[in-house]
Amino acid sequence: MSELQHVQSPVSFATLLPDAARRYLAHTTDGRPIRDIAREAGCHASTVLRQVRKTESMRDDPLVDKALSVTEGDDVDSPCSDAVLDAAATALRDLCKPGAMMLYTVDVSQPAIVQTTGEGDACVLSTLTLAIAAALVMRGWIAQDGGTGVKRYKVTPDGRASLPALVATRDRRASRDMESVLDDFSDHKPDRRSRDRTQANGPGSESPLMALARRRGSDGQPFLSSEHLAAGDRLQEDFAISDFAKTDLLGWETPDSLNPLYARANATEDHRRKDATLRTLDAVRDLGPGLSDVVVRCCCLREGLEATEKRMGWSARSGKVVLRIALQRLSLFYATTLSKEGVLIG
């Protein structure tokens, strides 16, 4: 059996709940009228009523019922804490591993995530609080998969798709915390690469992804999905943490061209920067020379699509199509990497 990793969080699971569950708690626990909740949310009272009824029906799940029964007094409007984000990301990462499932019975205080092998052996990957497990169920990221006395839960497609965005959000918060610490040092002077990134990502410079996200295709759907945006944000965050110059990841032709960058990354003593650099290089290598160029330019350097089209020699308005294809592959890369046993992204 592998070493047990405890995933604990002293913070209420209410910070991770979807809006529907928050409104349910506001009505049932705080006693607020449905019309008041609807007015505050900017929706019709019938919408809130349906959400309350749906959430109430979820209490048939003993895990959800037990968690909801102990939420009285929790602040459901408090922001999601780093502890909650880390616990949820770790649990989802473990559940994405082959043969993984979460087990729960009312006789235990903490659900456990176990992994089975082809030989029928099982090992405990981690435990998590009842509250976090219930929040994952209520968000639809995990679902029951049988069991009588001991309930089995497995990750859902929505859970797999949400993992990159969840990890990116967690790391973004950590990155901002680190930036605030650096700002306290008056003698901190960024090197050339840092200045390059600041100029590329300076205040007021909007990512081309955000502009495309506001557009809609002929089918009325957003041109870029939430998975596309999450993948682009993930790459940009890692790039910002890394020590790349503006041109380091542009114009390469063969995987061997990236070897010097891998060697430099492996020689870095800063583990956080090293991990971010290696993740970025792996993603760029998976995309290939052409697709990686457009993603690096638009996501990491925040170069406009028109400028990218001119640099790449493409026809006008073709860049957004290529960028979407690249983001689809990047999203698949992150989802696949996160599901591999023993690989930690974040």
Image (cartoon, helix red, strand yellow):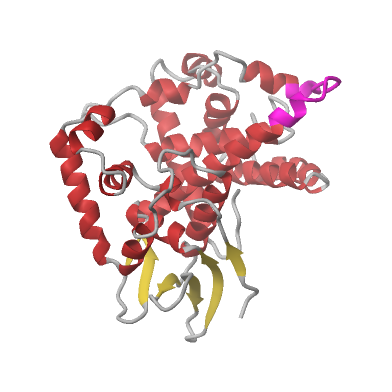
Left or right side of 68 for 47: left
- Using the image as rendered, state which of residue 107 and residue 240 is in the foreground: 107
In the visual, does 250 lie left or right of 164?
Answer: right
- Please state the horizontal and vertical placement of residue 41, each as a whole percent of the image: 27, 30
Q: Does the rendering let one see residue 22?
A: yes
At x 21% / y 30%, what residue is drawn?
Answer: 43
The answer to whether residue 289 is seen in the rendering is no
Left or right position of 14 against 266 = left
Residue at image location 47% in from the left, 18% down from the top: 305
The residue under the point 74% across, 19% down is 195
Judged from this view, the residue extending furthest toward the right is 187
Image coordinates for residue 126, horizontal then vertical, percent? 55, 68
Q: Quadrant of the N terminus?
A: bottom right
Drawn side of residue 32 relative to residue 125, left or right: left
Residue 32 is situated, as x and y percent measured from the top left of the image, at 25, 39
Q: x, y (%) of residue 160? A: 42, 54
Identify the magenta region.
Answer: 179-194
Please tell me which residue is depicted at 26% across the width and 62% down the height of the picture.
59
| The one of 67 and 245 positioned closer to us in this rendering | 67
Whether 131 is drawn above or below 261: the answer is below
Asked if the magenta segment contains residue 84, the reply would be: no
Q: In which quarter of the image is residue 223?
A: top left
Does 226 appear above or below 304? below
Q: Nearer the viewer, residue 256 or 78?
A: 78
Quarter of the image for residue 132 reads: bottom left
Front residue (pair 155, 112): 112
